[in-house]
Image (tube, rainbow, N blue to C red):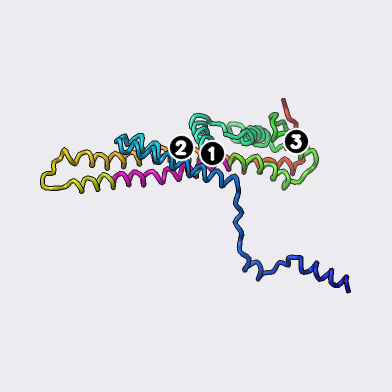
């Protein structure tokens, strides 16, 4: 009898999945403490830069005002990662290499594999060097990815396992590029709205000044305010859009290299080629 009671308690303590419970059950939102801290930092930073931007706006330094608010938007969406995004933007603008070493290893290793696996042809299009034979030795550059591939091939692992390792080299850099691109795109989309708000403020001031004794000289400052804020909003939006496009280009290039790398390593695994890492 006691054993039956214990069994009943164990059954009651277990969660039995069912289609009804899956439908009724509501998803829970887990709050990441680190993410919450970054959000507060971003909000406070944005409010501080917004106040500075308003001060420059009041003193009619519209260019600096719009510049400060653009940085404020970056701080709002990125928080403590603002410095990382700024440094990454300079790097991708003036360098052709990837920001993460793992992604650079992937490109270097793929270049060596392409040289070995590609069919060599003459100028007339005839094949002078065919496919790599089975069990042939393939030399790869000395980096972490090459050594990982060598270890997995030597241990006779299936391609699914190798694919998982390749994905770990790809995903970290892809996440950084996608994160930076999304944040810069947000700022690029928001800046014309702030320029529009400045335009509306200038037009309201201009219409408030209309009267019997109105002159062109009295309306010129308000009209200049409306036009300048619109111009600077579009200008900074274009700058952030151009920088974001750099990250988008890197994402596409990385995706192409990753796909080609997966196919190349799959060929190596199927051919049971041996990997040699050259120093």
Sequence-earlier tag: 1 or 3: 1
Residue 153's image quarter?
top right
Residue in the foreground of this view, choosing between 226 and 127: 226
Q: Which residue is mark 2?
A: 243
Q: In this rendering, which labeled residue sits more in front, label 3 or label 2? A: 2
Which residue extends farthest left?
Answer: 212
Image quadrant assignment for residue 150: top right
Q: Is residue 65 magenta?
A: no
The location of residue 190, given as percent across then percent down, is 40, 46
What's the distance in space between the residues labelled 1 and 2, CA to CA? 20 Å
- Up-down: is 34 above or below 60? below
Characterize the local packing of mark 2: few (<14), some (14-19) or many (20 or more) Cα atoms within 10 angstroms: some
Report the quarter where the N terminus lies. Answer: bottom right
Hey, which quadrant is residue 6 in on the image?
bottom right
Residue 32 makes an appearance in the image: yes
| Residue density around tag 1, few if under 14, some if 14–19, many if 20 or more, within 10 Å | some
Residue named by callout 1: 80
Closer to viewer: mark 1 or mark 2: 1
Specify whether 122 is left or right of 228: right
Span highlighted in magenta in the image: 175-199
Helix, strand or loop under label 1: helix
* Category of crowding for the residue at label 3, using alpha-carbon neighbours closer than 10 angstroms: few (below 14), some (14–19), many (at least 20): many
Q: Which of marks 2 and 3 precedes in the sequence?
A: 3
- The residue that label 3 is drawn on is 150
Question: In this view, which residue lies farthest toward the top?
Answer: 279
Residue 68: percent from left, percent from top:
40, 37
Judged from the image, the secondary structure of the residue bearing numbered disc 2 is: helix
Query: In the image, what residue occupies the spot 52% across and 45% down?
Result: 40
Q: Are marks 1 and 2 in contact (CB under 8 Å)?
A: no
37, above or below 114, in the image: below
């Amino acid at each position: 009898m006691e054993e039956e009671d214990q069994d009943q308690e164990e059954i009651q303590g277990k969660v039995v999945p069912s289609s009804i419970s899956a439908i009724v059950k509501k998803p829970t939102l887990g709050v990441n403490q680190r993410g919450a801290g970054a959000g507060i930092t971003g909000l406070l930073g944005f409010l501080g830069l917004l106040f500075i931007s308003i001060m420059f706006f009041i003193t009619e330094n519209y260019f600096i005002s719009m510049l400060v608010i653009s940085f404020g938007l970056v701080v709002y969406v990125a928080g403590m990662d603002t410095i990382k995004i700024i440094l990454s933007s300079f790097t991708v603008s003036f360098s052709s290499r990837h920001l993460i070493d793992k992604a650079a290893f992937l490109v270097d290793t793929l270049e060596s594999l392409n040289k070995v696996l590609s069919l060599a042809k003459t100028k007339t299009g005839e094949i002078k060097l065919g496919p790599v034979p089975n069990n042939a030795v393939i030399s790869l550059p000395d980096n972490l990815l090459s050594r990982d591939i060598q270890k997995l091939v030597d241990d006779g692992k299936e391609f699914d396992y190798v694919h998982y390792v390749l994905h770990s080299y790809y995903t970290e850099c892809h996440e950084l590029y996608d994160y930076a691109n999304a944040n810069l795109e947000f700022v690029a989309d928001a800046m014309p709205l702030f320029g529009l708000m400045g335009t509306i403020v200038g037009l309201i001031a201009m219409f408030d000044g209309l009267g019997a004794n109105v002159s062109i000289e009295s309306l010129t400052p308000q009209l200049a305010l409306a036009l300048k804020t619109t111009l600077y909003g579009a200008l900074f939006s274009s700058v952030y859009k151009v920088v974001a496009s750099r990250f988008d280009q890197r994402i596409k290039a990385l995706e192409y290299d990753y796909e080609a790398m997966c196919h190349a390593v799959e060929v190596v695994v199927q051919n049971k080629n041996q990997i040699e890492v050259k120093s």
